[in-house]
């Protein structure tokens, strides 16, 4: 299953694909904010651990749905009003990052999510105590290496495409002005 590192990588790739600039790596606060948003649905594991000492008790329920991503996307887009440390991001982008978690779970795991909750709900089965969850997060985190490399590849591709588009736009502008001044001279 994608773990926090994998979900963070997917979230960062989703941000890169949806944004118009290459400023991600220079903004630590933004990376922290994106990491939180990309892992937000898995807070249901923490709730299960705190309430029932079982991380699977409430896992993959409402927090792994389109509805949750919409609601959290809305609140995350307003969160900058409460602290200057929180970056200002549009609703669509916040939604995309939270929803990238649900999509990641659908694509890379076998057990179902509750995509259309409240119309469907698929709770996770089994038992995972504190040690299981901590082991998964901190010891086995790098098992998502394929997802991390794939996401890094997407980030680089998005940057290359943006750079190419910007360069060809600049060249077209240059050509336009050259043509204009040539016409002026010949007239
Ligand atoms: Zn999840």
Image (spheres, grey):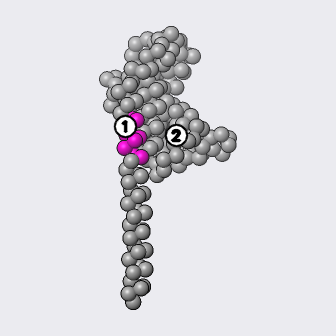
Proximity of marks 1 and 2: CB atoms separated by less than 8 Å: no
Where is residue 17? Give x, y as percent: 41, 45
The residue nearer to you, when weighing 152 against 66, is: 152
| Residue beneath disc 2 | 25
The residue located at (51%, 42%) in the rendering is 24
| Residue beneath disc 1 | 153
User: Which numbered tag is attached to residue 124?
Assistant: none
In magenta stretch: residue 178: no
In the image: residue 182, left or right of residue 55: left
The residue located at (42%, 68%) in the rendering is 173
Where is residue 84? Give x, y as percent: 68, 43
Q: CA distance from mark 1 to mark 2?
A: 15 Å
Query: Can see residue 86?
Result: yes
The residue nearer to you, when weighing 81 against 168, is: 168
Q: Main secondary structure of the magenta part?
A: helix
Stretch of the chain drawn in magenta: 151-159
């Amino acid at each position: 299953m994608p773990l926090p590192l994998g979900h963070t990588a997917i979230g960062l790739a989703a941000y890169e694909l949806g944004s118009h600039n290459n400023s991600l790596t220079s903004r630590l606060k933004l990376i922290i904010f994106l990491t939180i948003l990309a892992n937000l649905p898995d807070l249901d594991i923490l709730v299960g651990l705190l309430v029932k000492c079982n991380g699977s008790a409430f896992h993959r329920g409402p927090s792994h749905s389109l509805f949750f991503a919409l609601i959290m996307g809305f609140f995350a887009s307003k969160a900058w009003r409460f602290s200057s440390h929180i970056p200002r991001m549009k609703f669509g982008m916040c939604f995309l990052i939270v929803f990238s978690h649900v999509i990641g779970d659908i694509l890379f795991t076998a057990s179902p999510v509750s995509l259309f909750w409240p119309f469907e709900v698929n709770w996770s089965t089994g038992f995972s105590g504190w040690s299981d969850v901590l082991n998964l997060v901190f010891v086995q985190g790098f098992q998502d290496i394929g997802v991390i490399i794939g996401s890094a590849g997407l980030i680089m591709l998005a940057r290359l495409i943006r750079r190419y588009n910007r360069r060809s736009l600049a060249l077209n502008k240059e050509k336009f002005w050259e043509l204009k001044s040539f016409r002026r001279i010949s007239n």
